[in-house]
Image (cartoon, rainbow, N blue to C red):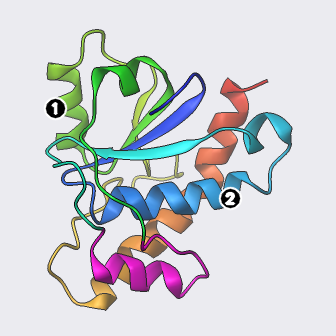
Amino acid sequence: MSGPGNIVVVCTANICRSPMAAALLQHALAAQPEALRTLRVISAGVAARSGEPVSQNSVLALRKVGLDISQYRSQPLTQRMIDEALMVLCMTDSHRAMIQVQADPVPRHLYLFREFLPGAGDKEIGDPYGGPIGVYEAARDEMVESIPSLVARLKTLVK
């Protein structure tokens, strides 16, 4: 389960995007100074079932960058995860809207994974589910592109 200072990454079923994004962000934080390095990144889904394996194309997309998420199993987003999170990161505006409607209280730091990228580009990460490996790799690359701006934002929250 989560604990104080965790980052929760959220998608729909917790079998494609959020496990990839959580692994990528955790990997990036491991190279940061102590306050950031000790943050734990977990993932969950707004419509997830417990215990589903991560999609094979998500595993392959991350294996290509040296990360292994093959043992990950899905979990639904809970109020406890939200309450204990330093930050909750969503893949789309619809995920954020679902959390805003269902969570009580709504998390103070609820953002899109790509929200802190400069410019007016697309801030959502589309669902690659069922698509070819290239779609998963494109989603992975959108996540990787977002990480420096996320780390910069986290530095303002963690002292």
- Say whether residue 121 is visible: no
Tell me what residue is drawn at x 55 percent, y 32 percent.
6
Q: Position of residue 152 (x, y in %)?
A: 69, 43
Kind of residue at disc 2? Ala
Quadrant housing residue 159: top right
Horizontally, residue 43 falls left or right of residue 144, namely left
Left or right, residue 87 beside residue 28: left
Secondary element at image label 2: helix
The amino acid at mark 1 is Met
Q: Which residue is mark 2?
A: 28
Asked whether 105 falls inside the magenta stretch, the response is no
**Vertical placement of residue 136 versus 4, above or below:** below
Quarter where residue 15 is shown: bottom left
First in sequence, mark 1 or 2: give its number: 2
- Foreground residue, 40 or 52? 52
Q: Which mark is residue 85?
A: none
Viewer-nearest residue: 39 or 115: 39
From which residue to which does the magenta span run? 54-70
Q: Would residue 67 be counted in the magenta stretch? A: yes
Vertical comparison of 27 with 105: above or below: below
Residue at image position (53%, 88%) is 64
Where is residue 104? Give x, y as percent. 25, 10
The relative height of residue 10 versus residue 27 in the rendered view (above or below) is above
Is residue 75 among what the camera can see? yes
Name the quarter where the N terminus is drawn: top left
Q: Please name the residue that numbered disc 1 is placed on.
A: 98
Q: Please, which residue is most extreme toward the top here? A: 105
| Residue pictured at 16% horizontal, 49% vertical | 49
